[in-house]
Image (cartoon, coloured by chain):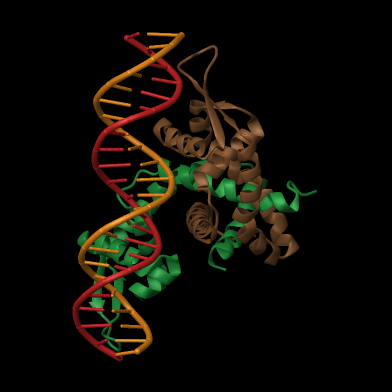
Chain colours: A brown, B green, C red, D orange
Amino acid sequence: MPEYADDELAAHLRAAIMRLRRRLVQETDSELSIPAMTVLGLLHRRGEQTVGQLAAAERVQPPSMTRTVTCLERDGLVARRQGESDRRQVVVSITEDGRTRLAADRDRRTEWLARRLADLTPDERAVLDEAAPILEGLATA
Amino acid sequence: MPEYADDELAAHLRAAIMRLRRRLVQETDSELSIPAMTVLGLLHRRGEQTVGQLAAAERVQPPSMTRTVTCLERDGLVARRQGESDRRQVVVSITEDGRTRLAADRDRRTEWLARRLADLTPDERAVLDEAAPILEGLATA
DNA sequence: TATTGTTATACTCTATAACTATA
DNA sequence: TATAGTTATAGAGTATAACAATA
């Protein structure tokens, strides 16, 4: 039987997301901000992307992405170059330093959550394993 | 078979939480801020609480909760009063206006998510129904 | 003219530090 | 002294508006 009435699932899920997000931010010990880390991850998985593509993928406005990319470039973790076919575009790529930092940081950043997950029962972990791609789908629908 | 390797579940879950939270903030059309709405919900469910209890429940520092409560009081949605046994404490309670606003806002605020949930298959909804309390547990563990 | 990205500016939520008042 | 809450201040992440360069 379902845990919540239909109307309540959305409310409870929303509350859980908000609290868990704050917890993830608080418990994280990393030199990389969350947006920076996320962009590095995107570039690692998808290869080089324009600022516009990155902004769309993360659903932020272009100025927010410009800011994140500027920080990453200053730290030598990504490189900017002018688009070839369309010279208005700015193509962003991850550097070797970026990949190194990504790997190191990914571990630290997910450590708290990974420990919490390890405390769950196998059944609970299985539920979250199924839930993760569904949540991801909700975010990008 | 699991969707993700052990190490990857935490990383994917974290990314999904971050994106979904931003989406929830963006798609929300409401007069109440998210912290304000959450505090009203707490007072509704638990009855009156001290500022310290509210801060602990939401895992924010006392000054952050003071700020939220001050906004809510200015709008007449909660009332403050001095604690009886310990006069350093401030007891916060929800007003009738607060309950009315909470009900109206809860619908608006969860509307986007509720619509998204309605688009899922029954199986997917069932997974999230099981996942919600587990996520809540992670946030407060 | 329309679009890509940047700069300038402001807002929201959060935190830490210092303070007030009670205990 | 120690604790509950507030005030003052700062920082991170986001947005909108105005601008530059290119299509």
Residue B134 found in image quarter: bottom right
| Residue B122 visible in the current orientation | no
- Between residues B140 and B8, which one lies in front from this camera angle? B8
Residue B18 x/y as whole percent: 52, 47
User: Across the whole image, how many numbered discs are drawn on residues?
Assistant: 0
Residue A133 x/y as whole percent: 65, 44
| Residue B55 visible in the current orientation | yes
- Between residues A60 and A103, which one lies in front from this camera angle? A103
Task: Classify residue A132 as left or right of residue D13.
Answer: right
Residue D3 x/y as whole percent: 37, 83
Query: Image point 28% across, 77% down: which residue?
Result: B90
- Is A84 above or below relative to B129? above
Task: Classify residue B79 as left or right of residue A111.
Answer: left
Query: Image point 40% across, 66% down: which residue?
Result: B42
Task: Classify residue B74 as left or right of residue A73.
Answer: left
Residue A60 found in image quarter: top left
Residue B118 x/y as whole percent: 55, 42
Query: Image point 52% across, 23% down: which residue?
Result: A81
Task: Classify residue A91 as left or right of residue A61.
Answer: right
- Between residues B21 and C5, which one lies in front from this camera angle? C5
Q: Quadrant of the C terminus of chain B?
A: bottom right
